[in-house]
Amino acid sequence: MFRFRLAIAIFVSFGFVLLLGVTLYWNTNQVAWYFQHSQTAYEAFDHYERLSQEAYRHFKQRMDSLITHSPAAAKGVKSSRQRLDKAMQELRDTAVKTEDDPHKPAELERAAHLTAFLDASEYWFDDIERLHQQGELEQATQALAKFSENEIDGNFQPMIDAAINAEREKAGKAKQDLENLLAQSRWIAILASLTAALFSFTSGIFLLRGVKKPVEALMKGTDEIASGNLDYRIVVNSHDEFAYLASHFNQMAQELYIQQNKLRDGRAVLEKRVAERTLELRRLNEELKRMDTARREFLADISHELRTPITVIRGEAEVTLRGLDRNADEYKDTLQRIAELAMQLGTYVKDLLFLASAETANLQFEWDSLDLAEVVASAVDDFLLMAEENGLSVSLTAANGPVWVYGDKQRLRQLLFILGDNACRYSKPQGHLAVALWMDEKQAFFTLTDQGIGIPAQDLERIFDRRFRSQNALNSRDDGSGLGLPMAQSIVKAHGGEISVASVENKGSTFTVTLPLILLEPDGG
C-alpha cells in the first residue's frame, strides 16, 4: 500500500528532523551561553574603563578644588562624584547579575575593594582639605603628594589594571570557546545536510517508482476533462489509493457531464439577472452622482454665506473706525449688528462641522522654550472677558517666577482657551473660576476649577472621546460639538503631558494639566 510506504518515509523523516532540531537547539543554547558570557565580559571591561576614567577625573577635580578653592571647582567635584558613583553602581550591577559564572566571587570581591578604596579616598581628601583650612599648607601638600603616589598610583591603578586584564582574558576565552562551538556547529550542519540530502534522494526514488504510472494516468484524465472530453474515463490496474481516486474521478466526470447540461439552462437565467442588476447599479450610480453634486452645491452655498457675513462685519468695523465724531449709541448699534452677524456665522460653522469628512487635521507645532506662567496670565485675561457675559469672577494663583516648559505657545493658549471657554459656558451665573499654576522639581501643574453643572460620574471616562457630550451638557446647551476636549487632550499629549478631570455633578469640575519642566533655563541651551 502506498500509504504504508509514505507513512514509513514520513516517520523516518520526522525522527531525523526531531533529532536534528534537538541537536541544533542544544548548540544554539551553548552559543547563546558563550555569547552572553562574552558580552558580559566586554560589558564589565567597559565599566572598569569608565570607572577608571571617572575616578581619575574625580581625583583631579578634588585636587583642583584643594588648590583653587573656587565655587566652580567645588561644583565640579560634586558632579564628578555623582558620575563616579554611577559608574561604580553600574559595575556592581554587572557583577551581581552574572549567573553560572565561576568568576563571580572574584568580580564581587574586586568591586568591593574598589568601592572601599573610593570611599576611603573621600576621607583622605577631606583630611587634606581640613589641613588646608587650618592653614597647614605644607603638610596638606605633602599629604596630597603621598596620597597620589601611594594610594592612587600604588593601590588604585594596579587594582584597575588587574580588573581590566582579568576581564580582557575572560572575554578572549569566551570568544575562543564561542568560535570553537561555532566550528563544531558548522560541521554538524554540514553532516546533517548531507544526511538529509541522501535520505531525501533515496526516499524520492523509492516513492517515485510507486506513483509514476498512476499519476500519469490521472494527469492524462485531467487533461481530457479540462479540454471538454467528459466521456473520457481513467483505467488504473491496481488496488491501492490511486485506484480509489480514479474511480471517484470517473464519477466526478459523470457528474460534471450532468452539471454541464444544467449550466447551459441556468446561464440564460443568470445573464438575465446580471442585466437587471447592471441596470439597477447604473441607476444607483446616477443617484450617487446627483447626491454628490447636491453636496458640492450646498458647500458652495455655505462658503458664499460664510463670506458674506465676514465681509459685512469687516465693513461695519472699518466704517465705524473711520468716523471721528460718533457717539456711544452709534457704536452700540454697530456692535449689535456685528454680534448678530457673528451669531449667524457661528450657525454656518456648526453646519460645516457636521458635514466635515475628516474631523481634524494633523496638528502642526512650533516648538520653543517658553514661560508657562506668562501664557497662563495672558489666558486669564481672556477668561475675564468671557466670564463677564455670565457675571463670573476669575482668580489666579501662580508660582513666583517663571515656569519654563518646552512647547508651542499658540497651541498651549488654544488648550487654555478650550478649558476656559467650557468653564464659562457651563458655569452657573455669579459663579467663580479658580485658576492655579504651580510646579515641583520635574513638572508644572495647571488647574481650572469652576462652579458649574459638573460631569456625571458615568461620563467621566468618555469626556475626552471625540464628539461625546454628557447628558447634562446637552440639556444645558445645544451649541457644542464635542471636539474641544479631544483637541485639548491631543495638544497635552503632544507636549508629553497629561490631562485629567475631577467633577461632582451640579457642583463643578476641576481640570488638571501636567507638563514636564525643562531642566535648564532657555538661555542656557
Image: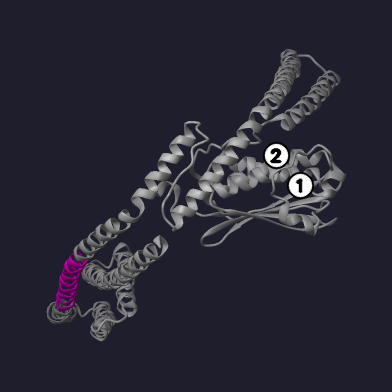
The percent coordinates of residue 212 (x first, y second) are 34, 50
Residue 58: in sight, yes or no? Answer: no
Element at badge 2?
A: helix
The percent coordinates of residue 517 (x first, y second) are 51, 55
The percent coordinates of residue 219 (x first, y second) are 41, 42
Q: Quadrant of residue 355?
A: top right
Residue type at the position of mark 2: Asp
Residue type at the position of mark 1: Ala
Q: Of label 1 and label 2, which has the lower sequence position?
A: 2
Q: Residue at x 72, y 20 (%)?
A: 279
Q: CA distance from mark 1 to mark 2?
A: 12 Å
Q: How many marks?
A: 2
The percent coordinates of residue 10 (x first, y second) are 37, 64
Q: Which range of residues does the magenta coloring cover?
A: 161-188
Asked if the stretch drawn in magenta spans residue 84, the answer is no
Q: Nearer the viewer, residue 32 or 412?
A: 32
Q: Nearer the viewer, residue 360 or 270?
A: 270
- Per the picture, the main secondary structure of the magenta-coloured stretch is helix
Seen in the picture, residue 148 relative to 496 is either above or below; the reply is below
Residue 116: in sight, yes or no? Answer: yes
Number of the label disc, if any, that sits on residue 423 = 1
On the image, numbered disc 2 is attached to which residue? 382
Q: Nearer the viewer, residue 201 or 360?
A: 201
